[in-house]
Amino acid sequence: MNPLFADLPTTVFEEMSGLARRHGAVNLGQGFPDNEGPEDVRAAAAKATMDGPNQYPPMVGLLSLREAVAAHYARHQGLSLDPETQVVVTSGATEALAASILALVRPGDEVVLFQPLYDAYLPLVKLAGGVPKLVRLTPPHWEMTEAALDAAFGPKTRVVVFNNPLNPSATAYGADQLARLAERCVRHDAVAICDEVWEHLVFDGRRHIPLYAMPGMAERTVKIGSAGKIFSLTGWKVGFVCAAPKLAGVVAKAHQFLTFTTPPNLQTAVAYGLGKADGYFDDMRAGYGRSRDRLAEGLKSEGFVVLPSAGTYFLNVDLTASGVSIGDREFCLRAVQEMGVAAIPVSAFYAQDPVTSIVRLCFAKKDSTLDAGIERLAEARRRFN
Ligand code: PMP
Ligand code: GLN
């Protein structure tokens, strides 16, 4: 057995959803909406299933989807991508991350990563033989300081794995911070694997800026997206990698031995969905923005100190500032078992020196679910001291 996996705990998302099922809890933990996603996109998948083809699509994805991805990013983010050579369809962002990390990290390469980090990054970097260099980000601003970046980057840095908007902090990094990172990637000749699955989930009139668009980055950025997040269909697992032809080509070589391809019916439906009018994306953002505000206001009125949420499905509360003296993991375990509400301890996103006072809540839920969650969290805050 490979100790890399044998010694790993089950991910905190699975753990907390399992506990939520067992205790019949309101689940504000794992990030998924409690709606079924847009009906027309699902209808397109149903039609494609019945009409076919249902046999292996091309390894890099249906051309219709690669064209739709390129057109979508041209329209929404001003990028110019060649669908034939610069887009690879994967089975979710998770597979895109695995293919990119396995294809681009060589044993001994230093890889810059940011804590809090999404659970898949570190095991994949280690599997590839990379040497992790962690930048520790902290609340409330989760800023990438010049000093912290300089401490992590060095002559052996070959790859950076960056997530923007950042899960779990709900930070949307803007041009100034991206420029700091891009400047170092260029200086050290590093490739950035940029996980942008939350790109459409940014609130209050913000626009997502892809790292790919920063000066000098187009030839060294592997941009990862996920239809699961764009269409509130998290179970679909259709992702895409966009990169310069040389980088996209090597990622495709890894993808061919991970999953080889992705269900064609879902690819056809996602191609349809990416072409939806701007109004769909604006309405989706506005809806989730209202849910964020409902959860934030409800928690504040119950005495919680809430951190800003610029993007993602998530809102964080600061336990210590809210007068709760126990740590985030204990709070979450007791909340799901004793109060019937599941949340995610942010310490689970740190490999070293964790921040232990922050709890992540998913607001992509019906109002009634949010209200029930607020009530139970309020009771937990009163009791767990
Ligand atoms: N990266 C991040 C930062 C995520 O939050 C998620 C899931 N929410 C993923 C990757 C995985 O995306 P997918 O379901 O498309 O594999
Ligand atoms: N990305 C989701 C979250 O952050 C979880 C996905 C998963 O469970 N692998 O909650």
Image: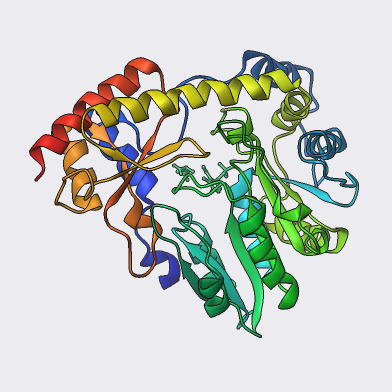
Image quadrant containing the C terminus: top left
**The N terminus is located in which quarter?**
bottom left
Could you tell me how many numbered marks the image carries?
A: 0
Q: State the image quarter where residue 271 is shown.
A: top right
Residue 47 drawn above or below residue 198: above
Q: In the rendered image of this protein, does residue 382 appear above or below residue 122?
A: above
Residue drawn at point x = 87 percent, y = 46 percent: 80
164 shown above or below 371: below
Is 379 left, or right, of 154 in this rendering?
left
Q: Residue at x 16, y 45 (%)?
A: 323
| Residue 306 position within the rendered picture, expressed as x and y whole percent measured from the top left | 33, 39
Q: Is residue 214 left or right of residue 365?
A: right
User: Can residue 340 be seen by looking at this rendering?
Assistant: no
Closer to us: 279 or 334: 279
Residue 124 left/right relative to 157: left
Q: Which residue sits at x=76%, y=20%?
A: 277
Q: Tell me residue 41's x, y (percent).
A: 68, 20
* Residue 201: % across, % down: 58, 34
